[in-house]
Image (tube, grey):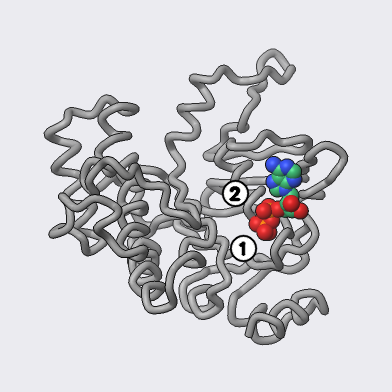
């Protein structure tokens, strides 16, 4: 496991993620209308809000699966997508964007494992083919990560032989195999049968305890309350309210937050 997972956070340092007036439009539809957000190293931030409020789009911008229409996002002090040279902005080269993306792990609602590969093969694929890690070393690391998510004994199973919760844990191990400094989770438990949700949340909680920086889109309010350092409530492409989970979830200031929480509770 890389240093990012085990190192302790220094909340006073510069933010790992900084979004300033982030805007995203699809055609003439403005989906994100000026998001300002900072996430510090070691912090766990839960993004809450109704469907369609732009939470997924914001994660996809951070991971550069979408390109900003306006505003800026920095990860670890580096501008995403563009770089400043000679006082002007230049679009980054694909290789540069790939390098930036490799520092970020993302776990989706659907597990997206390669069906023709075993759990272990799924985990070692990117380290070997993208990072050019030595295959034997990648295998050792992969087994360690599968152990971390409680699946060491399922290393040679194919996704179809695993439950949804187990597949999602493999997906987490696969994301960690690239030794990311930031993990993004997009409703990682919402496609799971209710009895499988807990095992995935437990792995995420352990990861948070290990010091990983995480941005988690979730409707699991108990997870947000217990694990998040901060919750951010979004609606219609803006941040409506953010703060301490206990305060925001128990006594939200904004009527829109209150209305949403009344609906999901
Ligand atoms: P959330 O994650 O909060 O449910 P999303 O970020 O998925 O919200 O979506 C925000 C809005 O952006 C929705 O209205 C959605 O239909 C729209 N949207 C998302 N992706 C695209 C796209 N590729 N093209 C057009 N509209 C999109």
Instruction: Tell me what residue is drawn at x 62 percent, y 32 percent.
Output: 79
- Per the image, the residue denoted by label 1 is 47
Q: Is residue 106 visible?
A: yes
Q: Is residue 115 left or right of residue 250?
A: left
Q: Residue furthest top?
A: 86
Q: Nearer the viewer, residue 145 or 120?
A: 120
Q: Residue 163 lies in what quarter of the image?
A: bottom left
Q: Position of residue 90 (x, y in %)?
A: 68, 17
Q: Position of residue 213 (x, y in %)?
A: 46, 55
Q: Residue 71 lies in what quarter of the image?
A: top right
Q: Is residue 55 left or right of residue 205?
A: right
Q: Position of residue 167 (x, y in %)?
A: 33, 57
Distance from mark 1 CB to nearest ligand 1 atom below 8 Å? yes
Instruction: Tell me what residue is drawn at x 83 percent, y 37 percent.
Output: 27
In this figure, what is the number of numbered marks? Answer: 2
Asked which secondary structure carries label 2, the reply is helix
Q: Residues within 10 Å of mark 2 (few under 14, many from 20)?
A: many
Q: Nearer the viewer, residue 120 or 71?
A: 120
- Identify the image quadrant of the C terminus: bottom right
Q: Is residue 192 left or right of residue 81?
A: left
**Image mark for residue 6:** none
Asked if 78 appears above or below 162 in the picture, the reply is above
- Per the image, the residue denoted by label 2 is 59
Asked if 65 appears above or below 215 in the picture, the reply is above
Distance from mark 2 CB to nearest ligand 1 atom below 8 Å? yes
Q: Is residue 20 visible?
A: no
């Amino acid at each position: 496991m890389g240093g990012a997972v085990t190192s302790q956070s220094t909340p006073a340092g510069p933010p790992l993620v900084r979004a300033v007036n982030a805007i995203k439009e699809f055609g003439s539809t403005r989906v994100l209308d000026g998001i300002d957000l900072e996430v510090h190293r070691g912090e766990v931030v839960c993004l809450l809000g109704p469907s369609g409020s732009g939470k997924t789009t914001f994660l996809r911008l951070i991971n550069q699966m979408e390109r900003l229409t306006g505003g800026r996002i920095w990860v670890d002090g580096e501008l995403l997508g563009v770089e400043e040279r000679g006082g002007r902005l230049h679009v980054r080269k694909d290789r540069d964007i790939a390098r930036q993306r490799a520092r970020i792990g993302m776990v989706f609602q659907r597990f997206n494992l390669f069906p023709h590969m075993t759990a272990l093969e799924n985990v070692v694929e990117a380290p070997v083919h993208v990072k050019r890690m030595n295959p034997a070393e990648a295998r050792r690391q992969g087994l360690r990560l599968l152990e971390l998510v409680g699946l060491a004994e399922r290393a040679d199973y194919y996704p179809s032989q695993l439950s949804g919760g187990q597949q999602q844990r493999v997906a987490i191990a696969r994301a960690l195999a690239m030794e990311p400094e930031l993990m993004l989770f997009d409703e990682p438990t919402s496609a799971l049968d209710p009895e499988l949700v807990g095992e995935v949340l437990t792995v995420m909680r352990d990861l948070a305890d290990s010091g990983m920086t995480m941005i988690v889109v979730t409707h699991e309010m108990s997870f947000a309350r217990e694990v998040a350092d901060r919750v951010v409530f979004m609606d219609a492409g803006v941040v409506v309210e953010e703060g301490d989970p206990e305060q925001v979830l128990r006594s939200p200031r904004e009527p829109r937050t209150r209305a949403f929480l009344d609906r999901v509770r």
